[in-house]
Amino acid sequence: MVNVKVDIKNNYIWNKTKLASGSVLYFAGFVYWKNHFYNTNNIAELFESIEVGKEILQELRGDFSFIYLSKEKTFAAVDRKRSLPLFYFVNGNEWTISDKVSTGLSKEIDPVSVNEFIITGYTANDRTLLKGVNQLEAGQFLKIIGNDLQKDWYFRFYHSPEEITIEEATLELEKVFHRTFSKLYERVKDKAVMIPLSGGYDSRIIALLIKEYGHTNVSSFTYGRAENPEARKSKEIADILGFNWTIFPYTKENWFKWYHSKEWDQLVKFSSNYSSMTHIQDAPAVTNLVKDVNEKYVFIPGHTGDFISGDHIPFELTVDKEFTADEVVQSILGKHHRLWSTSNQDVNREIITEIKHSFSDLPFQDSEQASALFEFWDWKERQAKFIINSLRTYEYYQQEWEIPLWDDELIDFFLRMPVKYRYKKYLYNLTLHKMYPDFFDEPTLSIQSGSSLKNKYGPLYGVLRKGYNVKRVFQQYHKDPMEWYGIYGSYYNYLLNITFTYNGSRFTNPYNINSFLVKDYIKNLKG
Protein backbone atom coordinates (compact mmCIF):
# COMPACT_ATOMS: atom_id res chain seq x y z
CA MET A 1 0.00 0.00 0.00
CA VAL A 2 1.34 3.45 -0.97
CA ASN A 3 1.03 6.11 1.70
CA VAL A 4 0.04 9.70 0.89
CA LYS A 5 1.62 12.66 2.62
CA VAL A 6 0.21 16.17 2.33
CA ASP A 7 2.81 18.89 2.73
CA ILE A 8 1.20 22.35 2.79
CA LYS A 9 3.66 25.22 3.19
CA ASN A 10 1.45 28.30 2.79
CA ASN A 11 -0.85 27.94 5.79
CA TYR A 12 -1.95 31.54 5.34
CA ILE A 13 -4.30 30.55 2.52
CA TRP A 14 -4.77 26.81 3.11
CA ASN A 15 -7.10 25.34 5.70
CA LYS A 16 -7.17 21.77 7.05
CA THR A 17 -10.53 20.36 8.14
CA LYS A 18 -11.54 16.97 9.52
CA LEU A 19 -14.93 16.03 8.10
CA ALA A 20 -17.69 14.18 9.95
CA SER A 21 -16.98 11.06 7.87
CA GLY A 22 -13.41 10.98 9.20
CA SER A 23 -11.98 12.17 5.88
CA VAL A 24 -9.53 15.08 5.86
CA LEU A 25 -9.82 18.08 3.55
CA TYR A 26 -7.13 20.63 2.68
CA PHE A 27 -8.70 23.59 0.88
CA ALA A 28 -7.67 27.01 -0.43
CA GLY A 29 -9.75 29.65 -2.21
CA PHE A 30 -13.51 29.68 -2.76
CA VAL A 31 -16.16 27.89 -4.84
CA TYR A 32 -19.76 28.35 -5.92
CA TRP A 33 -22.01 25.31 -6.15
CA LYS A 34 -25.73 25.53 -6.88
CA ASN A 35 -25.61 29.28 -6.20
CA HIS A 36 -24.09 28.79 -2.75
CA PHE A 37 -20.76 30.34 -1.80
CA TYR A 38 -18.14 28.33 0.08
CA ASN A 39 -14.70 29.31 1.35
CA THR A 40 -12.37 28.03 4.04
CA ASN A 41 -14.92 28.99 6.72
CA ASN A 42 -17.73 26.72 5.55
CA ILE A 43 -16.19 24.40 2.95
CA ALA A 44 -16.77 21.35 5.18
CA GLU A 45 -20.52 21.74 4.60
CA LEU A 46 -20.03 21.24 0.87
CA PHE A 47 -17.66 18.29 1.05
CA GLU A 48 -19.86 16.50 3.57
CA SER A 49 -22.78 16.64 1.10
CA ILE A 50 -21.13 15.64 -2.21
CA GLU A 51 -19.38 12.68 -3.80
CA VAL A 52 -15.85 13.90 -4.52
CA GLY A 53 -14.96 13.13 -8.13
CA LYS A 54 -14.76 14.38 -11.70
CA GLU A 55 -18.49 15.02 -11.99
CA ILE A 56 -18.65 17.44 -9.07
CA LEU A 57 -15.58 19.30 -10.35
CA GLN A 58 -17.41 20.03 -13.58
CA GLU A 59 -20.11 21.76 -11.53
CA LEU A 60 -17.86 23.81 -9.24
CA ARG A 61 -16.96 27.40 -10.14
CA GLY A 62 -14.36 29.56 -8.44
CA ASP A 63 -10.68 29.96 -7.60
CA PHE A 64 -9.60 26.93 -5.59
CA SER A 65 -7.41 23.94 -4.95
CA PHE A 66 -8.10 21.04 -2.63
CA ILE A 67 -6.73 17.72 -1.40
CA TYR A 68 -9.26 15.20 -0.08
CA LEU A 69 -8.14 12.12 1.85
CA SER A 70 -10.47 9.28 2.76
CA LYS A 71 -9.97 5.62 3.60
CA GLU A 72 -10.76 4.68 -0.01
CA LYS A 73 -8.85 7.32 -1.99
CA THR A 74 -6.88 10.51 -2.19
CA PHE A 75 -8.30 13.11 -4.57
CA ALA A 76 -6.69 16.46 -5.45
CA ALA A 77 -7.65 19.16 -7.95
CA VAL A 78 -6.87 22.68 -9.09
CA ASP A 79 -9.33 25.10 -10.67
CA ARG A 80 -9.76 25.93 -14.34
CA LYS A 81 -6.77 28.29 -14.43
CA ARG A 82 -4.36 26.80 -11.86
CA SER A 83 -4.69 29.89 -9.68
CA LEU A 84 -3.49 27.83 -6.68
CA PRO A 85 -0.97 25.23 -7.93
CA LEU A 86 -0.38 21.72 -6.63
CA PHE A 87 2.64 19.44 -7.12
CA TYR A 88 3.19 15.75 -6.51
CA PHE A 89 5.98 13.17 -6.47
CA VAL A 90 6.74 9.74 -5.08
CA ASN A 91 9.59 8.69 -2.79
CA GLY A 92 9.75 4.94 -2.19
CA ASN A 93 6.32 3.91 -0.95
CA GLU A 94 5.04 7.42 -0.22
CA TRP A 95 3.32 9.95 -2.48
CA THR A 96 3.65 13.60 -1.51
CA ILE A 97 1.17 16.28 -2.62
CA SER A 98 2.20 19.86 -1.87
CA ASP A 99 1.53 23.49 -2.72
CA LYS A 100 5.30 24.14 -2.90
CA VAL A 101 8.33 22.44 -4.40
CA SER A 102 10.99 22.49 -1.72
CA THR A 103 14.58 23.44 -2.50
CA GLY A 104 15.64 20.50 -0.35
CA LEU A 105 14.45 17.79 -2.75
CA SER A 106 17.24 15.59 -4.04
CA LYS A 107 15.97 15.30 -7.59
CA GLU A 108 17.78 15.26 -10.91
CA ILE A 109 17.41 18.29 -13.18
CA ASP A 110 15.33 17.61 -16.33
CA PRO A 111 17.31 19.01 -19.32
CA VAL A 112 14.26 19.22 -21.61
CA SER A 113 12.36 21.24 -19.02
CA VAL A 114 15.37 23.53 -18.54
CA ASN A 115 15.47 24.39 -22.23
CA GLU A 116 11.72 25.04 -22.28
CA PHE A 117 12.05 27.23 -19.20
CA ILE A 118 14.85 29.28 -20.75
CA ILE A 119 12.83 29.99 -23.89
CA THR A 120 9.39 30.54 -22.30
CA GLY A 121 9.80 31.15 -18.56
CA TYR A 122 7.89 28.01 -17.48
CA THR A 123 7.89 24.24 -17.91
CA ALA A 124 5.52 22.61 -20.39
CA ASN A 125 2.74 20.15 -19.68
CA ASP A 126 2.80 18.52 -16.22
CA ARG A 127 6.58 18.61 -15.77
CA THR A 128 8.78 20.75 -13.53
CA LEU A 129 12.52 21.36 -13.69
CA LEU A 130 13.00 18.33 -11.44
CA LYS A 131 12.62 14.81 -12.82
CA GLY A 132 9.85 12.94 -11.06
CA VAL A 133 8.24 16.08 -9.64
CA ASN A 134 5.03 16.90 -11.50
CA GLN A 135 2.26 19.44 -11.31
CA LEU A 136 -1.46 19.47 -11.89
CA GLU A 137 -2.27 21.56 -14.94
CA ALA A 138 -5.21 23.94 -15.12
CA GLY A 139 -8.48 22.00 -15.14
CA GLN A 140 -6.91 18.74 -13.90
CA PHE A 141 -7.34 16.37 -10.97
CA LEU A 142 -5.53 13.33 -9.66
CA LYS A 143 -6.80 10.29 -7.81
CA ILE A 144 -4.72 7.81 -5.81
CA ILE A 145 -6.23 4.44 -4.91
CA GLY A 146 -3.83 1.90 -3.48
CA ASN A 147 -0.69 1.94 -5.60
CA ASP A 148 -2.41 3.54 -8.59
CA LEU A 149 -2.28 7.26 -9.44
CA GLN A 150 -4.64 8.46 -12.16
CA LYS A 151 -4.76 11.97 -13.59
CA ASP A 152 -7.28 13.49 -15.98
CA TRP A 153 -8.85 16.70 -17.25
CA TYR A 154 -12.24 17.79 -16.02
CA PHE A 155 -12.04 21.01 -18.07
CA ARG A 156 -10.12 22.14 -21.15
CA PHE A 157 -10.10 25.66 -22.57
CA TYR A 158 -11.14 24.86 -26.13
CA HIS A 159 -13.71 26.85 -28.10
CA SER A 160 -17.05 25.53 -29.34
CA PRO A 161 -18.44 28.55 -31.22
CA GLU A 162 -22.15 29.19 -31.55
CA GLU A 163 -24.15 31.22 -34.06
CA ILE A 164 -24.83 34.59 -32.46
CA THR A 165 -25.11 38.14 -33.73
CA ILE A 166 -22.72 40.79 -32.48
CA GLU A 167 -25.66 42.68 -30.96
CA GLU A 168 -26.77 39.63 -29.01
CA ALA A 169 -23.19 38.91 -27.93
CA THR A 170 -22.52 42.41 -26.57
CA LEU A 171 -25.78 42.41 -24.61
CA GLU A 172 -25.00 39.01 -23.13
CA LEU A 173 -21.40 39.93 -22.28
CA GLU A 174 -22.54 43.08 -20.46
CA LYS A 175 -24.84 40.93 -18.31
CA VAL A 176 -21.99 38.49 -17.62
CA PHE A 177 -19.77 41.38 -16.53
CA HIS A 178 -22.41 42.58 -14.10
CA ARG A 179 -23.05 39.13 -12.63
CA THR A 180 -19.30 38.64 -12.24
CA PHE A 181 -18.75 41.92 -10.46
CA SER A 182 -21.89 41.57 -8.35
CA LYS A 183 -20.40 38.37 -6.92
CA LEU A 184 -16.99 40.02 -6.59
CA TYR A 185 -18.50 42.92 -4.67
CA GLU A 186 -20.10 40.54 -2.18
CA ARG A 187 -16.71 38.89 -1.59
CA VAL A 188 -14.76 42.14 -1.08
CA LYS A 189 -17.28 44.73 0.13
CA ASP A 190 -15.88 44.75 3.68
CA LYS A 191 -12.25 44.74 2.59
CA ALA A 192 -9.73 47.31 1.36
CA VAL A 193 -9.30 46.93 -2.41
CA MET A 194 -6.05 47.72 -4.21
CA ILE A 195 -6.09 47.92 -8.02
CA PRO A 196 -2.86 47.81 -10.06
CA LEU A 197 -4.12 50.47 -12.48
CA SER A 198 -2.03 50.45 -15.64
CA GLY A 199 -4.23 52.66 -17.78
CA GLY A 200 -5.04 49.72 -20.07
CA TYR A 201 -8.53 48.40 -20.76
CA ASP A 202 -8.44 45.44 -18.36
CA SER A 203 -7.60 47.30 -15.17
CA ARG A 204 -9.84 50.17 -16.31
CA ILE A 205 -12.99 48.02 -16.57
CA ILE A 206 -12.23 46.56 -13.14
CA ALA A 207 -11.96 50.05 -11.65
CA LEU A 208 -15.16 51.24 -13.33
CA LEU A 209 -17.25 48.26 -12.24
CA ILE A 210 -15.88 48.33 -8.68
CA LYS A 211 -16.92 51.96 -8.58
CA GLU A 212 -20.34 51.22 -10.09
CA TYR A 213 -21.08 48.62 -7.43
CA GLY A 214 -20.42 51.18 -4.73
CA HIS A 215 -17.21 50.05 -3.09
CA THR A 216 -15.67 53.05 -1.35
CA ASN A 217 -12.49 51.65 0.21
CA VAL A 218 -10.53 51.47 -3.06
CA SER A 219 -6.96 52.53 -3.79
CA SER A 220 -4.84 52.16 -6.90
CA PHE A 221 -1.22 52.32 -7.96
CA THR A 222 1.07 52.18 -10.94
CA TYR A 223 4.82 52.11 -11.49
CA GLY A 224 7.59 52.97 -13.95
CA ARG A 225 8.75 56.35 -15.16
CA ALA A 226 6.47 59.03 -13.73
CA GLU A 227 6.10 60.72 -17.11
CA ASN A 228 5.20 57.62 -19.13
CA PRO A 229 1.78 57.66 -20.88
CA GLU A 230 0.51 54.64 -18.95
CA ALA A 231 1.11 56.39 -15.63
CA ARG A 232 -0.62 59.57 -16.81
CA LYS A 233 -3.67 57.62 -17.98
CA SER A 234 -3.74 55.64 -14.75
CA LYS A 235 -3.80 58.82 -12.66
CA GLU A 236 -6.48 60.33 -14.88
CA ILE A 237 -8.79 57.34 -14.38
CA ALA A 238 -8.16 57.25 -10.62
CA ASP A 239 -8.89 60.98 -10.28
CA ILE A 240 -12.17 60.69 -12.20
CA LEU A 241 -13.31 57.77 -10.04
CA GLY A 242 -12.12 59.34 -6.80
CA PHE A 243 -9.67 56.55 -5.93
CA ASN A 244 -6.48 57.10 -4.01
CA TRP A 245 -3.57 56.73 -6.44
CA THR A 246 0.14 56.20 -5.90
CA ILE A 247 3.00 55.90 -8.35
CA PHE A 248 6.18 54.02 -7.56
CA PRO A 249 8.97 55.39 -9.74
CA TYR A 250 11.25 52.66 -11.08
CA THR A 251 14.87 53.66 -11.63
CA LYS A 252 17.91 51.70 -12.74
CA GLU A 253 19.57 52.31 -9.38
CA ASN A 254 16.59 50.97 -7.45
CA TRP A 255 16.35 47.94 -9.72
CA PHE A 256 19.95 47.01 -9.03
CA LYS A 257 19.34 47.16 -5.27
CA TRP A 258 16.06 45.24 -5.49
CA TYR A 259 17.32 42.50 -7.79
CA HIS A 260 20.31 41.81 -5.55
CA SER A 261 18.31 41.93 -2.33
CA LYS A 262 17.43 39.11 0.04
CA GLU A 263 13.77 40.05 -0.55
CA TRP A 264 13.93 39.16 -4.25
CA ASP A 265 15.79 35.94 -3.54
CA GLN A 266 13.13 34.87 -1.04
CA LEU A 267 10.30 35.84 -3.39
CA VAL A 268 11.81 33.69 -6.14
CA LYS A 269 12.07 30.70 -3.81
CA PHE A 270 8.48 31.23 -2.66
CA SER A 271 6.86 31.58 -6.07
CA SER A 272 8.86 29.76 -8.74
CA ASN A 273 8.35 26.14 -7.59
CA TYR A 274 10.83 24.90 -10.18
CA SER A 275 8.17 25.50 -12.81
CA SER A 276 7.39 29.21 -13.32
CA MET A 277 9.60 32.28 -13.43
CA THR A 278 8.78 34.77 -10.70
CA HIS A 279 6.85 37.81 -11.94
CA ILE A 280 9.05 40.84 -11.33
CA GLN A 281 6.86 43.57 -12.77
CA ASP A 282 4.95 44.88 -9.75
CA ALA A 283 6.97 43.20 -6.99
CA PRO A 284 8.88 46.33 -5.82
CA ALA A 285 5.67 48.39 -5.84
CA VAL A 286 3.80 45.76 -3.82
CA THR A 287 6.71 45.57 -1.39
CA ASN A 288 6.51 49.31 -0.78
CA LEU A 289 2.72 49.25 -0.48
CA VAL A 290 2.60 46.67 2.29
CA LYS A 291 5.86 47.47 4.08
CA ASP A 292 5.31 48.73 7.62
CA VAL A 293 1.53 48.94 6.99
CA ASN A 294 -0.99 46.96 9.02
CA GLU A 295 -3.62 47.26 6.29
CA LYS A 296 -4.57 44.05 4.50
CA TYR A 297 -5.57 44.52 0.88
CA VAL A 298 -7.38 42.53 -1.76
CA PHE A 299 -5.31 43.10 -4.88
CA ILE A 300 -7.40 42.97 -8.08
CA PRO A 301 -5.12 42.94 -11.14
CA GLY A 302 -6.42 42.91 -14.72
CA HIS A 303 -5.33 39.35 -15.45
CA THR A 304 -6.08 38.49 -18.22
CA GLY A 305 -8.79 40.16 -20.24
CA ASP A 306 -6.68 40.40 -23.36
CA PHE A 307 -6.21 36.63 -23.52
CA ILE A 308 -9.76 35.62 -22.56
CA SER A 309 -11.19 37.93 -25.22
CA GLY A 310 -8.91 36.75 -28.05
CA ASP A 311 -6.20 39.38 -28.39
CA HIS A 312 -3.40 36.80 -28.64
CA ILE A 313 -4.75 35.10 -31.78
CA PRO A 314 -2.36 35.56 -34.74
CA PHE A 315 -3.89 36.73 -37.99
CA GLU A 316 -2.58 33.64 -39.81
CA LEU A 317 -4.93 31.42 -37.77
CA THR A 318 -8.04 33.42 -38.73
CA VAL A 319 -7.69 32.80 -42.47
CA ASP A 320 -10.34 30.62 -44.10
CA LYS A 321 -8.22 27.58 -45.08
CA GLU A 322 -7.29 24.10 -43.95
CA PHE A 323 -4.52 24.04 -41.31
CA THR A 324 -1.90 21.53 -40.28
CA ALA A 325 -0.71 20.87 -36.74
CA ASP A 326 2.72 22.23 -37.74
CA GLU A 327 1.18 25.60 -38.66
CA VAL A 328 -0.39 25.88 -35.21
CA VAL A 329 2.94 24.88 -33.63
CA GLN A 330 4.76 27.60 -35.58
CA SER A 331 2.23 30.18 -34.41
CA ILE A 332 2.77 29.10 -30.80
CA LEU A 333 6.55 29.24 -31.21
CA GLY A 334 6.39 32.71 -32.73
CA LYS A 335 4.18 34.08 -29.96
CA HIS A 336 5.50 32.36 -26.84
CA HIS A 337 8.91 30.75 -27.37
CA ARG A 338 11.01 33.86 -27.73
CA LEU A 339 12.68 34.79 -24.47
CA TRP A 340 15.87 33.40 -26.02
CA SER A 341 16.81 31.92 -29.39
CA THR A 342 19.10 28.96 -29.98
CA SER A 343 20.48 27.37 -33.13
CA ASN A 344 20.66 23.98 -31.39
CA GLN A 345 18.17 21.99 -33.45
CA ASP A 346 17.98 19.20 -30.88
CA VAL A 347 16.65 21.71 -28.35
CA ASN A 348 14.17 23.13 -30.86
CA ARG A 349 12.91 19.66 -31.80
CA GLU A 350 12.40 18.75 -28.12
CA ILE A 351 10.30 21.88 -27.61
CA ILE A 352 8.15 21.17 -30.67
CA THR A 353 7.59 17.63 -29.41
CA GLU A 354 6.37 18.99 -26.07
CA ILE A 355 3.93 21.35 -27.79
CA LYS A 356 2.50 18.58 -29.97
CA HIS A 357 2.26 16.29 -26.97
CA SER A 358 -0.08 18.77 -25.32
CA PHE A 359 -2.47 18.84 -28.30
CA SER A 360 -3.91 15.43 -27.39
CA ASP A 361 -7.01 14.70 -29.46
CA LEU A 362 -8.05 18.31 -30.14
CA PRO A 363 -8.80 19.23 -33.78
CA PHE A 364 -7.02 22.01 -35.70
CA GLN A 365 -8.14 21.84 -39.33
CA ASP A 366 -10.13 25.07 -39.82
CA SER A 367 -9.66 28.60 -38.50
CA GLU A 368 -12.03 28.11 -35.56
CA GLN A 369 -10.19 24.97 -34.51
CA ALA A 370 -6.67 26.27 -35.21
CA SER A 371 -7.24 29.46 -33.21
CA ALA A 372 -8.89 27.43 -30.43
CA LEU A 373 -5.92 25.06 -30.25
CA PHE A 374 -3.51 28.02 -30.16
CA GLU A 375 -5.45 29.47 -27.21
CA PHE A 376 -5.68 26.07 -25.52
CA TRP A 377 -1.89 25.95 -25.32
CA ASP A 378 -1.69 29.61 -24.22
CA TRP A 379 -4.29 28.96 -21.49
CA LYS A 380 -2.61 26.02 -19.82
CA GLU A 381 0.97 27.21 -20.27
CA ARG A 382 1.66 30.96 -20.34
CA GLN A 383 -1.55 32.14 -18.69
CA ALA A 384 -1.68 29.54 -15.91
CA LYS A 385 2.03 29.19 -15.24
CA PHE A 386 3.32 32.72 -15.75
CA ILE A 387 0.60 35.38 -15.79
CA ILE A 388 -1.68 33.94 -13.11
CA ASN A 389 1.30 32.65 -11.14
CA SER A 390 2.15 36.32 -10.52
CA LEU A 391 -0.45 36.10 -7.73
CA ARG A 392 2.27 34.46 -5.63
CA THR A 393 3.72 37.96 -5.08
CA TYR A 394 0.60 38.99 -3.13
CA GLU A 395 0.59 35.73 -1.18
CA TYR A 396 4.24 36.20 -0.25
CA TYR A 397 3.20 39.34 1.64
CA GLN A 398 0.08 37.58 3.03
CA GLN A 399 -2.26 39.74 0.98
CA GLU A 400 -5.45 38.56 -0.72
CA TRP A 401 -6.19 38.65 -4.44
CA GLU A 402 -9.08 38.36 -6.88
CA ILE A 403 -8.95 37.82 -10.66
CA PRO A 404 -12.49 38.66 -11.88
CA LEU A 405 -11.54 38.64 -15.57
CA TRP A 406 -10.89 34.91 -15.12
CA ASP A 407 -14.34 34.34 -13.65
CA ASP A 408 -15.67 31.00 -14.88
CA GLU A 409 -18.79 32.57 -16.36
CA LEU A 410 -16.62 34.87 -18.48
CA ILE A 411 -14.57 31.86 -19.55
CA ASP A 412 -17.72 29.93 -20.51
CA PHE A 413 -19.03 32.92 -22.45
CA PHE A 414 -15.93 33.45 -24.58
CA LEU A 415 -15.58 29.75 -25.28
CA ARG A 416 -18.84 30.06 -27.22
CA MET A 417 -17.73 33.05 -29.31
CA PRO A 418 -16.51 32.67 -32.93
CA VAL A 419 -13.00 33.75 -33.86
CA LYS A 420 -14.29 36.71 -35.92
CA TYR A 421 -15.52 38.29 -32.67
CA ARG A 422 -12.49 37.33 -30.59
CA TYR A 423 -9.74 38.48 -32.97
CA LYS A 424 -8.13 41.68 -31.65
CA LYS A 425 -10.68 41.68 -28.78
CA TYR A 426 -13.39 43.11 -31.04
CA LEU A 427 -16.38 41.86 -29.04
CA TYR A 428 -14.71 42.66 -25.70
CA ASN A 429 -13.77 46.22 -26.70
CA LEU A 430 -17.15 46.88 -28.33
CA THR A 431 -18.94 45.79 -25.17
CA LEU A 432 -16.74 48.00 -22.98
CA HIS A 433 -17.45 50.92 -25.33
CA LYS A 434 -21.21 50.36 -25.08
CA MET A 435 -21.00 50.09 -21.30
CA TYR A 436 -18.76 53.13 -20.79
CA PRO A 437 -18.50 55.15 -24.03
CA ASP A 438 -16.57 57.96 -22.32
CA PHE A 439 -13.81 55.58 -21.23
CA PHE A 440 -13.40 53.18 -24.17
CA ASP A 441 -13.09 53.93 -27.88
CA GLU A 442 -15.36 52.19 -30.38
CA PRO A 443 -13.38 49.41 -32.12
CA THR A 444 -13.53 48.38 -35.77
CA LEU A 445 -13.99 44.82 -36.99
CA SER A 446 -10.54 44.13 -38.45
CA ILE A 447 -10.49 40.40 -39.18
CA GLN A 448 -11.61 40.84 -42.79
CA SER A 449 -8.92 43.35 -43.63
CA GLY A 450 -6.22 42.13 -41.27
CA SER A 451 -2.75 41.08 -42.21
CA SER A 452 0.54 40.19 -40.60
CA LEU A 453 4.03 41.60 -40.96
CA LYS A 454 5.10 38.25 -42.39
CA ASN A 455 2.53 38.57 -45.19
CA LYS A 456 3.26 42.25 -45.69
CA TYR A 457 7.02 41.92 -46.20
CA GLY A 458 7.12 38.42 -47.71
CA PRO A 459 10.66 37.01 -48.22
CA LEU A 460 12.18 40.12 -46.60
CA TYR A 461 10.41 39.48 -43.30
CA GLY A 462 13.08 37.21 -41.83
CA VAL A 463 15.92 39.60 -42.65
CA LEU A 464 14.04 42.66 -41.40
CA ARG A 465 12.98 40.94 -38.20
CA LYS A 466 16.52 39.81 -37.44
CA GLY A 467 17.84 43.34 -37.99
CA TYR A 468 15.11 44.82 -35.82
CA ASN A 469 15.79 42.35 -33.02
CA VAL A 470 19.51 43.11 -32.99
CA LYS A 471 18.81 46.84 -32.84
CA ARG A 472 16.21 46.37 -30.11
CA VAL A 473 18.57 44.37 -27.88
CA PHE A 474 21.19 47.10 -27.96
CA GLN A 475 18.72 49.93 -27.38
CA GLN A 476 16.27 48.55 -24.80
CA TYR A 477 18.59 49.15 -21.84
CA HIS A 478 18.21 52.91 -22.42
CA LYS A 479 14.64 53.08 -23.70
CA ASP A 480 12.54 50.79 -21.54
CA PRO A 481 9.98 52.81 -19.50
CA MET A 482 10.31 50.46 -16.52
CA GLU A 483 14.11 50.91 -16.32
CA TRP A 484 14.43 47.31 -15.19
CA TYR A 485 17.56 46.51 -17.15
CA GLY A 486 19.30 48.35 -14.34
CA ILE A 487 19.39 44.96 -12.59
CA TYR A 488 22.91 44.62 -14.03
CA GLY A 489 24.19 47.95 -12.76
CA SER A 490 25.63 49.29 -16.01
CA TYR A 491 25.19 49.11 -19.76
CA TYR A 492 28.50 47.26 -20.02
CA ASN A 493 27.31 44.53 -17.64
CA TYR A 494 24.01 44.36 -19.51
CA LEU A 495 25.88 43.70 -22.77
CA LEU A 496 27.85 40.92 -21.08
CA ASN A 497 24.53 39.15 -20.41
CA ILE A 498 22.88 39.28 -23.85
CA THR A 499 24.24 35.83 -24.74
CA PHE A 500 24.99 32.79 -22.62
CA THR A 501 25.68 29.08 -22.87
CA TYR A 502 23.98 26.37 -20.85
CA ASN A 503 24.63 22.63 -21.10
CA GLY A 504 26.36 23.06 -24.45
CA SER A 505 23.63 25.20 -26.08
CA ARG A 506 24.19 28.87 -26.88
CA PHE A 507 21.27 31.24 -26.31
CA THR A 508 21.06 34.67 -27.96
CA ASN A 509 18.68 37.54 -28.72
CA PRO A 510 16.98 38.21 -25.35
CA TYR A 511 13.41 39.39 -25.83
CA ASN A 512 12.56 41.23 -22.58
CA ILE A 513 13.39 41.44 -18.89
CA ASN A 514 12.12 37.90 -18.30
CA SER A 515 14.87 36.64 -20.62
CA PHE A 516 17.44 37.78 -18.11
CA LEU A 517 15.50 36.52 -15.10
CA VAL A 518 15.30 32.97 -16.47
CA LYS A 519 18.96 33.04 -17.46
CA ASP A 520 20.05 33.97 -13.94
CA TYR A 521 17.58 31.53 -12.36
CA ILE A 522 18.79 28.60 -14.46
CA LYS A 523 22.44 29.50 -13.91
CA ASN A 524 21.81 29.19 -10.16
CA LEU A 525 19.61 26.09 -10.47
CA LYS A 526 20.19 23.29 -8.01
CA GLY A 527 18.21 20.10 -7.67
Image (cartoon, rainbow, N blue to C red):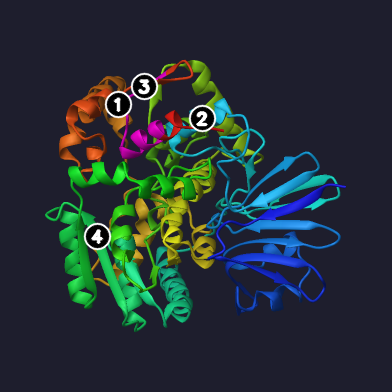
Closer to the chain start, of discs 4 and 1, is 4
The quadrant in which residue 174 appears is bottom left
Residue type at numbered disc 4: Thr
- Identify the residue position indicated by label 3 in the image: 500
Looking at the rendered image, the disc whose residue lies closer to the viewer, 3 or 4, is: 3
Q: Nearer the viewer, residue 97 or 405?
A: 97
The reply to whether residue 282 is in sight is: no
- Element on which disc 1 rests: loop
Asked if labels 2 and 1 touch by Cβ distance under 8 angstroms, the answer is no
Q: Which residue is mark 4?
A: 222
Residue at horizontal 56 percent and vertical 24 percent from the top: 350
Residue 313 visible (yes or no): yes
Residue 497's disc is 1
- C-alpha span from label 2 to label 3: 14 Å
Q: Which mark is residue 370?
A: none
- Per the model, the C-alpha gap separating discs 4 and 2 is 33 Å
Q: Which residue is mark 2?
A: 114
Cα–Cα gap, marks 1 and 2: 18 Å
Label 3 with label 1: CB-CB less than 8 Å:
yes
